[in-house]
Image (cartoon, rainbow, N blue to C red):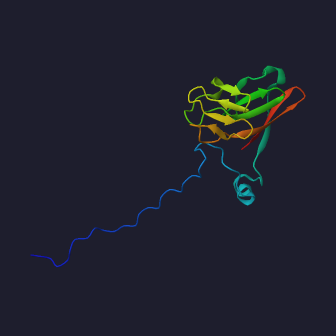
Amino acid sequence: MGSSCAWRPLLRPRPSPPTPRKIGSPPFSVEKPREPQILKALTGFASPMEQDVTLCKVEEIPDGALKHFEIMGYDVMVVRLGDHFYCVDEACTYKWAMLTDGHVDRERVAVVCKDCNGAWDLRTGQPKDLPAKFPLNVYRIETVGDDVIVTFTY
């Protein structure tokens, strides 16, 4: 009753691994704009949509303050340092804490998380101190008269 054929496992093709994310791109970041022809096919517009959102009056944000706002379902924070305003994502990319609970490092123009002590540059969103590894999204902000206006791209 012996068989001359040895047992071999059934070979199946392995599924391809998922495409890796770029290093430094968090899973929650806003997608980069698509090619114009793809955008036009999907949305009817050839460029990403931008919307100017008036957040508040200039005097409502004191110097050195961190203030939370919600724009189209996204949590952002506005920081005022003298006459300069900065708008970035509000969530810490390490512990998901609210960065408005942290503090501003004026010398480095950075926001520091109170939970993990990670720091991010307010001008670029890039991490400055560990354990922060992923950048924050940065939004264009300006003052027109006494209004603070953020340009939100989606």
Indicate the quadrant where residue 97 lies.
top right
Indicate the quadrant where residue 52 lies.
top right
Indicate the quadrant where residue 142 lies.
top right
Which residue is most to the bottom?
Answer: 4
The C terminus, quarter of image: top right
Instruction: Tell me if 106 is positioned left or right of 112 in this view.
Output: right
Instruction: Tell me if 151 is positioned left or right of 3 in this view.
Output: right
In percent of width and height, residue 35 lies at 72, 58
Residue that appears at 76% across and 33% down: 86
The residue nearer to you, when weighing 19 against 34, is: 19
In the rendered view, tell whether residue 8 sits above or below residue 114: below
The residue nearer to you, when weighing 129 against 145, is: 129
Residue that appears at 57% across and 52% down: 21
The residue nearer to you, when weighing 33 against 90, is: 90
In percent of width and height, residue 128 lies at 65, 38
Instruction: Tell me if 14 is positioned left or right of 126 in this view.
Output: left
In percent of width and height, residue 28 lies at 60, 42
In percent of width and height, residue 27 lies at 57, 44
The N terminus, quarter of image: bottom left
